[in-house]
Amino acid sequence: MNTGQRSMIKAAVGKAIDFLVTSCGKDGCWRDFPAMLNGSDEWVTTYVGAVLARSGDQGRQAARAAWKNFSFRHAFERDAGWGYRPGSPVDGDSTAWGLKFAFNLGLWDKPRTLLARAFLLRHLTPEGGITSFINEDEVRSWRKLTPDDSIQGWLSTHNCVTAAAATLPGFNQILTPFLQSVQLTNGGWKSYWWSDDVYATAFAAEAFRILNTENSREPLRQAVSWVTSRLANNAYIATETFPEGSPFVTALSLKTLVYGIPDESHQSMIRAVTEWLLKNQRDDGSWQASAWLQTPPPAMVSPVYTDRWIKEKGAAWGTITLDEAALFTTATVLDTFLILLKH
């Protein structure tokens, strides 16, 4: 990365922070995915807050203000984590991101965080990964399911949730053996809640980079190999719904490349992908909404026929919902740029 590109990244970071800060609601929460169960505030806030907490002064100040009000949700309940939105069960994924939010603010050992850490540990499965839900009765009540309806899929181990949790102190060494055992032969990791496997892959790569042992090098090498094969000769990754490039998927691919300790031959690819993301930032500081949240039926352990879900929205097989406010996409690109500036 030359001086000129670094300056452009810093300018893009500033614009993205402005966009996210001004998008925060009066109650200190961020909201997105409006078409999925009336949208998310808690889960989206944990994700956006975690990114802003490690950004510049303006972003960090907004993150602190959000945490001050948001962190007390569920603090005095038996399950002291966070969930998708009020009324939904607290879950492992939202709690993992809430902990990342706290960690990035330097609050890892505070009482509220300790409660959430204990709750997340309860999501550890016999396989050695993390599941999203552990309270069957609450899930059935929330989704209006009968005792005869299977919810095995939502109670199973989820690679994308495990990968995010594995970036946390204390969870990294516990969870990376499982991640290594389920890495696909192509080098990626299968996502459960996301329509593209690059989400689970990017955070698994981050987890193995944090682990930083001799055994972590091979999973990282394979992850980089998969991402480079998807990029091919392009500076972006095209998807069915974004044939000219998905900012969300492309940013996660770039994150994988940076965390994957790529060799010198990959530096030109990193520069090209960075340039594409810079060119596609919108005037308001955001990037085009392109994060597809995938919601399999509760019984489905391994999502299938996901290519039909967008076309047949509401079908029994499952649904896929876009981050229409572009908050998740923008936070993801911002996070990748912040990582890039440190390497």
Image: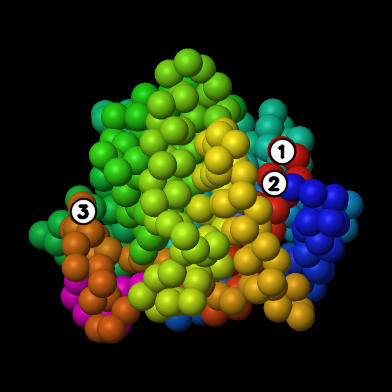
Q: Is residue 8 left or right of residue 307?
A: right
Vertical order, 129 against 30 (above or below): above
Say which label, 1 or 3, has the lower sequence index: 3
Give the residue number, with chain letter if any, for mark 1: 343
Q: Residue at x 56, y 75 (%)?
A: 289
Q: Residue furthest right?
A: 57
Q: Residue at x 80, y 68 (%)?
A: 15
Amino acid beneath label 2: Leu
In the rendered structure, find residue 302 and report the number of the disc placed on it.
Answer: 3
Which residue range is magenta in the image? Answer: 313-320
Say which quadrant the C terminus sits in.
Answer: top right
Give the residue number, with chain letter if any, for mark 2: 340
Vertical order, 73 against 319 (above or below): above
**Percent coordinates x, y for residue 290 in the rendering:** 51, 72
- Provide the secondary structure element on which disc 1 rests: loop
Give the quadrant of residue 126: top left
Mark 3: few/some/many CA within 10 Å (<14, 14-19, 20+): few
Residue 333 falls within the magenta-colored stretch: no
**Percent coordinates x, y for residue 142 in the rendering:** 34, 65
**Percent coordinates x, y for residue 198 in the rendering:** 43, 53
